Amino acid sequence: MGEVTGYKLLERIYESENSLVYRGRSQVDDLPVIIKILKEDYPTPAELTRYRQEYEITRTLNLDGVIRVRGLEPYKRTLAIVLEDFGGQSLKTLFSKSCISPAKLLDLALQIVDILGQIHAQNIIHKDINPSNILLNPETQQLKIIDFGISTQLSREKPTLKNPRVLEGTLSYISPEQTGRMNRSLDYRTDFYSLGVTFYELLTGQLPFPTTDALELVHCHIAQQPVPPAQVHSDVPQVLSDLVLKLMEKTAEARYQNAAGLKADLEICRQQLQSTGALSPFSLGTLDISAQFQIPQKLYGRETEIDTLLAAFDRISEPQSGTNSELMLVAGYSGIGKSSLVAEVHKPITEKRGYFIAGKYDQFQRDVPYSAVISAFQDLVKQLLTEDETQLQTWRSRLLSALGPNAQVVIDVIPEVALITGNQPLVPELGPTEAQNRFNLVFQNFVRVFCSPDHPLVLFLDDLQWADSASLKLIRLMMSDRDMQSLLLIGAYRDNEVSPTHPLMTLLAQLLKEGATENTITLTPLSREHLSQLMRDTFQHSTEAIGPLAELVLQKTEGNPFFVNEFLKNLYDENLLQFNESLRLWEWNIDKIRAQDLTDNVVELLIARLQKLLPATQEALRLAACVGAQFDLATLAIICQKPSGEVFEALKPAIQTGLIIALSELNAELAIEQFRFGHDRIQQAAYALIASDHKAEVHLCIGRLLRDNISAEALAERIFEVVDHLNQATDFTSETQERQQLAQLNLQAGLKATSATAYQAAIRYLQMGLNLLADNDWQHTYELALSLHEAAVEAAYLSQNLDLQEQLTEVVLQQARNVLDRVKVYRMKILARSSQNRHLEAT
């Protein structure tokens, strides 16, 4: 059967999708052991990471109710975890397809909840509680929890939207927020939902949602109510049935808030059963007051707006509705809850088997063409790549059929598409106008592939007030396409940051004129009533008791939901809100709070909060803010000039406090690679930690480090990002060679923007390149000067800036060394004259 170093394998006792489990014996002390081995001969890095994580977390827990590990050993080309053998069998095996009595459930439940409470007390979220991961020794009745492979030491995570086939956890037991399809972060209360499903199965002998279809199962978790256990099996007492359903509430706020509160209700049930032999109804959760500071994540006062949004989705989902595609705008101040509102559309999308993709424009990267659109469709490609091979082949065929020989036009803008289509031939060069027409046609065909009544598409573009002009043109293109079906494009923007002449407002006026379907939801601040409701739910106090504090919070925050959250967190951090353990309630001194010099500016509040962090964490966040709203560990390690493991350790406090959000799982080094700031205002505050007169130098340093430390291929892909950093510091770039190198990079960025039909951005990059040239560069770097001018002439023509085109053309005609070098600008000159109906001059 084989050996793991120091251990002999005796018999296989279990086989899962990923693992083989054996009983064995130690060759050192002859003690019985359980050996868990990865099934694959060549496991993926993710599978190896999961095993290492399981070993590390289990080793550090050191609890009687958690299986103990003896070691992590290499085995052939994989890994083996060696665990104690205490004679346990899984509840799945012991009670498969059978019901257990309420008395037996209560005995098991009290043990499980006690252990789970101890695990949560050590800041571990299990994330995979189910009957297979709970072991019981039938003789001693000793119980232990196993399998910490996807557990996390982060107090809060934000699951990303994924194909149900690759979701972390066991799908039948997974909480709604763990699916990534709820507007919720994930915390320790996810384990209570999974525990509720486990209790449901033990009591009834069946799962609450017995479907085998993965997407349907996800929809059940987030939107369907299970049949109460008491209705499935008449022997289940009503109060126990209600307790299970309370654990399985869709929102974490409605479940038990801590293990102690749940344990208290289970104790009451057991005492009743022991004293009377029956269970009588009683009010659940009366002792379930959490000492943990938790602000509810649900939306307050947005019922009408949610209905409007869901109605729009219904219209584009039904082919008979007569609506092919629709633009829904969500307007409001920063922090008013635009993104949170949009996330409410996840439930019907899952039911309709649609796709939700999102991209966000960055306040510090406004020149990058199509940034949010590219990000959104990159997400879609990642979702599609997790489909099975049959489905993936269907998408490949649809894409190639729709794009024909022009697939490379889309791949040039969204390189990830090639992962589905495979490498595609280069497209022939066309004239400027023809190239733009081709791009428009091909991109329309590309989007249509993903939009149909069978799988409607919701595309969410956030912070449209910072969108580049090319993106706005693309939105107009999609919304004016009469053949586009089942597309809901949701755009969020800050209405206080756009004037009537803002490009976004101009676009909307054009769309209305063209008859596109467009609606706007305008979000207003929380009313006193809704703010009081939020605070009642947070502190479990009456309206009267909460009144003075709610009034103060409203006065300071003006009812802005993000500011309300940050303000309350600040009060808690300053010990102005405290939990009284003996009385089991939250307390505060309103006079003491009023006496504090509390700012009514959210960015100032955030800056003060950031300044309390460790210096290393502050430095990492400062530099991350320069990178963008979303950033990755590898880039941050380059610009911090530190090993990625050290940078990740510096980021951990910011993850724990919600300042930044993890967007990926652990890698092979047990670090997270992808992050985003929790909110624009947090990024703004982190950026403000850099002194104004030092910002340009920081961007210069970042630009140089990226330029010199990434491959030529990566540089070509990230050219806008690198050039944007360097362009902010041209006053500090004095060496002729570096200025010429930067001019060359701006040329590269300008050409890439032109090929993507982002002409305004192209002009900006090319003009920056021209400004970097010295007076004598026509003599010393003739080819660079000529290329920059030629590219700028073309971009100026394409953006209809004919005065600039004429001005640049004259420079080339004066400086060019031969007639062939003048040909390209003459061609643009002819096209410009023709476009103005000055045909005789053109001739």
Image (spheres, rainbow, N blue to C red):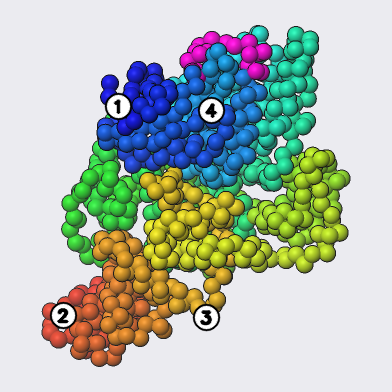
Mark 4 or 2: in front is 4
Task: Please give the residue where the numbered disc 1 appears in the rendered image.
Answer: 3
Q: CA distance from mark 1 to mark 3?
A: 64 Å
Residue 114 is drawn in which quadrant?
Answer: top right
Expressed as whole percent of the image width and height from the top left, the position of residue 258 reads 68, 35
Task: Please give the residue where the numbered disc 4 appears in the rendered image.
Answer: 145
Task: Please give the residue where the numbered disc 2 appears in the rendered image.
Answer: 821
* Element on which disc 4 rests: strand
Q: Residue at x 73, y 66 (%)?
A: 599
- Residue at the bottom extreme of this rendering: 776
Q: Is residue 801 visible?
A: yes
State which tag comes first along the sequence, 4 or 2.
4
Callout 4 touching callout 3 (CB < 8 Å)? no
Callout 4 touching callout 1 (CB < 8 Å)? no
Q: Amino acid at mark 2?
A: Asp
Q: Is residue 806 visible?
A: no
State which tag comes first along the sequence, 2 or 1.
1
Mark 4 or 1: in front is 1
Segment colored magenta: 88-107
Mark 4 or 3: in front is 4
Label 1 crowding class (10 Å Cα cut-off): few <14, some 14-19, many 20+? few
Label 3 crowding class (10 Å Cα cut-off): few <14, some 14-19, many 20+? few
Q: Residue at x 12, y 84 (%)?
A: 818
Expressed as whole percent of the image width and height from the top left, the position of residue 732 reads 40, 83
In the displayed structure, would residue 834 be above or below residue 806?
Answer: above
**Left of 128 or right of it: where is 776?**
left
